[in-house]
Image (cartoon, rainbow, N blue to C red):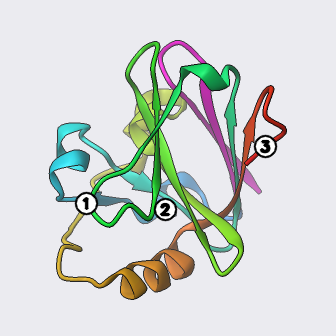
Amino acid sequence: MATIHGRCHCGNLQATLTTAKQPEEMWLRACQCDFCRSHNMRSLSDPDGRMELRVRDGSQVNRYHFGLGMVDFLICRNCGNYIGAVQAVDGRLYGIMNANLTDGRGARFGEAEHRFYEDETGAERSARRRKVWTPAVLLVEGEGGA
């Protein structure tokens, strides 16, 4: 098993992905929406792995919503980094993490495949995320998790 760690610049937002895959085997995606392009996002996930997203200070996280409003994009209010995103689908939480914020800052992953999702319906987006995102837990200190 491999464990991939990531964090925002100040350390308030942290992500851990546990996977049987090696980093060079991971499928990176670069969503081409305005938000993801402005953050130079390279999404990292493994549907067979597990992800823990941890917020040390819940008052310093922005759960940003846009588009269809289905996903919580986790942005640190202190340093401005975007660590990843989560969505509940059929009562289970799924997530992605930003490969650019991992140990080594994502250099070992290689190039990301450009992806275009603007034509998907909400149901199609949820189905895709359930299929390719990682089962996740979101732990927010002082809130007991979410």
Q: Quadrant for residue 58, please give it.
A: top right
Coordinates of residue 4 in the picture (x, y in percent): 63, 43
Question: Left or right: where does residue 49 sit relative to residue 124?
Answer: right
Q: Which segment is the magenta one?
A: 1-18
Report helix, strand or loop for mark 1. strand
Q: Image point 46% across, 13% down: which residue?
A: 78
- Which residue is denoted by mark 3 in the rendering? 145
Query: Which three-letter amino acid code belongs to the residue tagged 1?
Result: Cys
Report helix, strand or loop for mark 2. loop
Is-magenta flag for residue 65?
no
Mark 2–mark 3 Cα distance, whole angstroms, equals 28 Å
Query: Which three-letter amino acid code belongs to the residue tagged 3?
Result: Gly
Is-magenta flag for residue 12?
yes
Report helix, strand or loop for mark 3. loop
Q: Image point 59% across, 57% down: which residue?
A: 22
Q: Viewer-nearest of labels 3 and 1?
A: 3
Coordinates of residue 68 in the picture (x, y in percent): 32, 67
Question: Left or right: where does residue 21 sit relative to residue 112?
Answer: right
Q: Viewer-nearest of labels 2 and 3?
A: 3
Query: Which three-letter amino acid code belongs to the residue tagged 2?
Result: Met
Q: Image point 42% across, 65% down: which residue?
A: 27
Tag 2–tag 3 contact (CB < 8 Å): no
Q: Residues within 10 Å of mark 1 (few under 14, many from 20)?
A: many
- Which residue is denoted by mark 2 in the rendering? 26
Tag 3–tag 1 contact (CB < 8 Å): no
Instruction: Look at the magenta stretch and give its main secondary structure.
Output: strand
Q: Residues within 10 Å of mark 3 (few under 14, many from 20)?
A: few
Coordinates of residue 98 in the picture (x, y in percent): 44, 43
Q: Nearer the viewer, residue 123 or 127?
A: 123
- Which residue is denoted by mark 1 in the rendering? 31
